[in-house]
Every structure is written in C-alpha cells, then in structure tokens.
Amino acid sequence: MQLQGPPNEQKIQFRAGPWFLRKARPVVIAAGLLAIAGLSSSGKVAAATDDGPRGCTVATLKGRYLFAAVGTLYPPAFGVTEPTPAADAGYQLINGDGTGTDTVTLRVGGVIVLENVVLPTSYTVNANCTGTKSVLGGPNFGIFVAPDGSEFASIATDPGNFVSNIDHRVSHK
C-alpha cells in the first residue's frame, strides 16, 4: 500500500532566483573573509601536521629559563644515604640547537653543595613536544615543551632525584 498526500497537495519547489542570490552573496563573501582572517591572524596560514597544528623541534626551546624546586632526595642521588630535604634554583641558557648551560645553586640537607655552578647540558625535542634533557655528569630529565617554547615541564628520571618543575622563559637571549 502506497501512502499519498491529500488530493489537493501542491508540489512546492524552492528556486534560488536572482533575489535570493543578491541577498546571499554578501553573507557568503563575509563568512569567507572572516574564515581567512581567522586562519591568518598570526600572519600566516597554519599548516596541519600529524602532530596537530604545530609541532616542536630543538629550536622551539631558545633563551633563558628560570627554575626553582624543593623536595626530598632519596639514595643514591647526590650521595645521600637517607631521605634528605633539598632545594635548587637557577637558570638555563638554551641555544635552540640541542645544547645549553645550567647555572644552579643546590642545597642538600641545609648545606649548599653547589653555588652558581655552570654546567653544560644537552636536550632533545620530539615533534610531539616531548623530549629529554641531560646535565653533563648530573641528572637526566624528561621534558614536555609548550609549542611556542615559552615554558616546559621537567621531571627527573634518575633514581632518587626529586625534581619536577615548570621552567619559564624570561628572555629570548
């Protein structure tokens, strides 16, 4: 059985006549211009990658980054034999090429064991903005980089080290 409409049903067709086109054209043009302006508000159109709209490289990190942390060291870190309170502070100069230096003061158990010591560092950054950082002769870290390089989170990956921190860029030099 086939259903049919009422006997007096009129078939209505929508036609896009000249009046509709005249009214719709400015709206379509405005929407297109807004979309282009939104995509290029940073001065260039963003290109999508497998890692999202913006990935990272070693060049993402460049400049001076401040850090400070407090916590507890556990053996065998820095030669402690029992859980010991510790704190560090300093800055990193990161060159944007996988190298840098840390200037650090470290207090372990109330005693300053390093004071404004400059240590060479190396780092890697993956396209997904994760990476590693190593202090020559010192601790190693896992890092998580902001796509604009303005900051990064780090966590010590060696046994006994307490450090987990967010380092903020304070200068591009």
Image (cartoon, grey):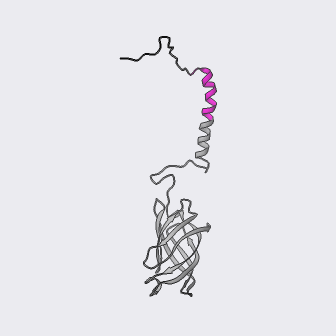
Q: Could you say which is closer to the camera, residue 98 or residue 50? A: 50
Classified by dominant secondary structure, the portion drawn in magenta counts as helix
Whether 22 is drawn above or below 32: the answer is: above
Is-magenta flag for residue 18?
yes
Q: Could you say which is closer to the camera, residue 147 or residue 100? A: 147
Residue span colored magenta: 16-29
The residue that appears at 50% across and 65% down in the rendered structure is 144
The picture places residue 150, in percent across and down from the top left corner, at 58, 63
Total marks in image:
0
Whether 25 is drawn above or below 15: the answer is: below
Q: Quadrant of residue 104?
A: bottom right
Q: In the image as oriented, which residue stretches furthest toward the left?
A: 1
Q: Is residue 130 left or right of residue 65?
A: left
Whether 41 is drawn above or below 110: the answer is: above
Q: Could you say which is closer to the camera, residue 123 or residue 162? A: 162
The residue that appears at 42% across and 78% down in the rendered structure is 159
The residue that appears at 58% across and 46% down in the rendered structure is 39
Is-magenta flag for residue 41?
no
